[in-house]
Each structure stands twice: as structure tokens, then as C-alpha cells.
Image (cartoon, helix red, strand yellow):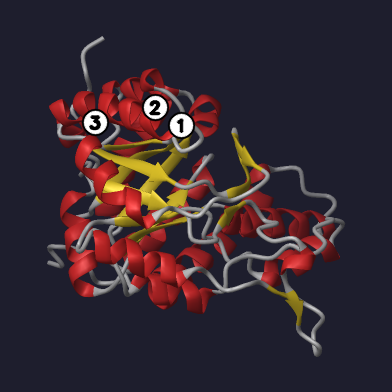
Amino acid sequence: MAVVDYKKIGLVNTKEMFARAIKGGWAVPAFNFNNLEQLQAIIQASSELKSPVILQVSRGARKYANPTLLRYLAEGAVEYAKELGCKHPEIVLHLDHGDSFETCKSCVDFGFSSVMIDGSSLPYEENIALTRKVVDYAHQYDVTVEGELGVLAGVEDDVASEESHYTKPEEVVDFATRTGVDSLAISIGTSHGAYKFKPEQCTRDPKTGRLIPPPLAFDVLAAVEEQLPGFPIVLHGSSSVPQEYVDIINKFGGKLPNAVGIPEDQLRKAAKSAVCKINIDSDSRLAFTAGVRETLAEHPEYFDPRQYCGKAREYMVDLYKHKITDVLGSDNKLANLD
């Protein structure tokens, strides 16, 4: 098949928005989506707030949605943003945690404007070789590539690890130089999923009984920045697991005990550094599930998906707006605000 030119369907890569984010001390939201309601909510929030946005799709989500449908959903997202009054949207379609050269190549061929190759579980030299191979292919089509050094704990789709391993700052220059990546995901204590920390890793708030997670390793981040000044850094596993949605889920039949995420003040601090892309997935899953559970509990007679997915979408729009404005600072950061 012929390679789909992402520029012809209105998408952009990450290069320019990352440069502006680093210079301006904010971060681009990278929101994962699996279904139409999530996509609608992301575009509604980012368009209203004039924020660049990265639509992230994991390998599992791509399979779930279908690669061909996904390509047209992305094209539709650009037109929808314009319909909502955002004349010059900056939307990236990004593969999250690509596991092989073949997966990344397929995404480039189907019109993705950015891909991530995650070789972080491989020996160092193998990670470099695999990442370089993806870079060489993607850069032919001006598709940006994210690599990863260090391993995050937790579970997200096909990505799972019992333990985290912080990124070694002494490796980042060699890795970035030899692979040619455009951005680098590092491990500083974030993790995947809604259970980012075990209770024994946390303290408890004596008033609420809620878990308080340990701080991120900002010393590692500072050392990476020192080694690679001005280079785009990415944080994965950065959902904050909003307790209001966890409470709604648990109130209406769910079972999410001790679900805890990354405190938003730490994400705000990271966004003011060279961290220019922050990945958020679990939070929207929680908002969606809270909306569905609440609606069906209060209206057991409902059987039309529009009725219960509508509330779920409202919750996600609110969540995305909050992240854009209060956490990442990416509102009104489009290159062209006309």
C-alpha cells in the first residue's frame, strides 16, 4: 500500500510544538483514546482551549479501533476541531509503546505523524539498534520518533513490569546521539495504570485515609536535563487518578481500593522543565467508567449507549480541560491563535 501522507489529512508532527513547550515552560497533553467518546472529548476540550494535542493510540487500541478506521477518525478529528472554531488545530496522531519495527512501520504507512518505539526492556545496545531502525524509516516521511530509556512499573495494555528502573542520566547523550530520536521517555518514578504505587510505598493522610504517593525523582530529571539541555523529555504513566472518579466508581458498584496516581503539583513542576509531553490515559478511563456506572445506577431503565456514554463524555471533557489549563499549561499555546 502507498504511505498515507499525514500532512494531507491535516496532522502535524511533534517537532515545533515541543520546541515551543520547552521554551515556554509548559507541556503538550498526550491523551490516549480507544473509542469515539474519548476522541470527541479530547477534541472538544483542546479546541475550546486552543491547545496543541497528541492523540495517543497503543498497539491494543489500534487493533480495537481498526487501523483503517483510525486513519479516518484522525482526519475527522482535524475537521471537527475546525468546525468547533479552532481554525489552526495542531493535532498529532501518535503510536504509544510500539513494540516492534513492524508495528511502527505500519503506523507510519497508515498516516501516523509520530511513533514511539519502546525498546526499554531490551539490553541497551539492542534498544539502540531497534530505535535507530525505526528512526531511519520514520524520518523518511518526516514522522517524529520517541524512544525510551528506563523501565516504568505497572500495567497498561500490553506493557507490564513489576519493577521500575530509573533512567541512567549517563546513558542519555549516547542514546540520543546514536539513535537520532526526536524525544526521549524517561523513568523518574511514574508508573502505568490506576495502581501506580503499592500502599507500603505511600503514607496515609490522617484526615482522609487516602494514600499519599512518594515524590518523583526530580534529581534524575535534573541530571538528564544537564546532560541533554533543551532536548524534549517525555513522562509516561502520569495519570493522577482523580479520587472523585474513583469514589463515584466505588459508590456505584466498582471495586478500586487504594487506587492512587501522580500528584498534580509534581506534574506541574515537571511541565516547567524540559518535560514537554505528559502522557495521560488512566484518568480518562476512570472518568468514563464513573459516568457510565453513575448513570446506569441512577437510571437502570437506560439501554441506549448515548444515554450513559453522554455523561461519560461530559466527565472526560471536564477532565481534559482541567489537565490542559491547570496541570500542563498548554491552553492558548497554538502557533496560530487566529
Q: Residue at x 29, y 36 (%)?
A: 75
Across and down, in percent, residue 293 comes to 77, 55
Q: Residue furthest top?
A: 1
Q: Disc 2 designates what residue?
A: 126
- Mark 1 lies on a secondary structure that is loop
- Mark 2 lies on a secondary structure that is helix
Which of the 4 image quarters holds residue 222? bottom left
Q: Is residue 46 left or right of residue 135?
A: right
Q: Which mark is residue 123?
A: 1
Placement of 221 over or under 41, stated as above or below: below
Across and down, in percent, residue 169 comes to 36, 57
Q: Quadrant of the C terminus?
A: bottom left
Mark 3 crowdedness (10 Å alpha carbons): few <14, some 14-19, many ≥20: many
- Mark 3 lies on a secondary structure that is helix
Q: Residue at x 55, y 49 (%)?
A: 152
Q: Amino acid at mark 2?
A: Glu
Q: Amino acid at mark 1?
A: Pro
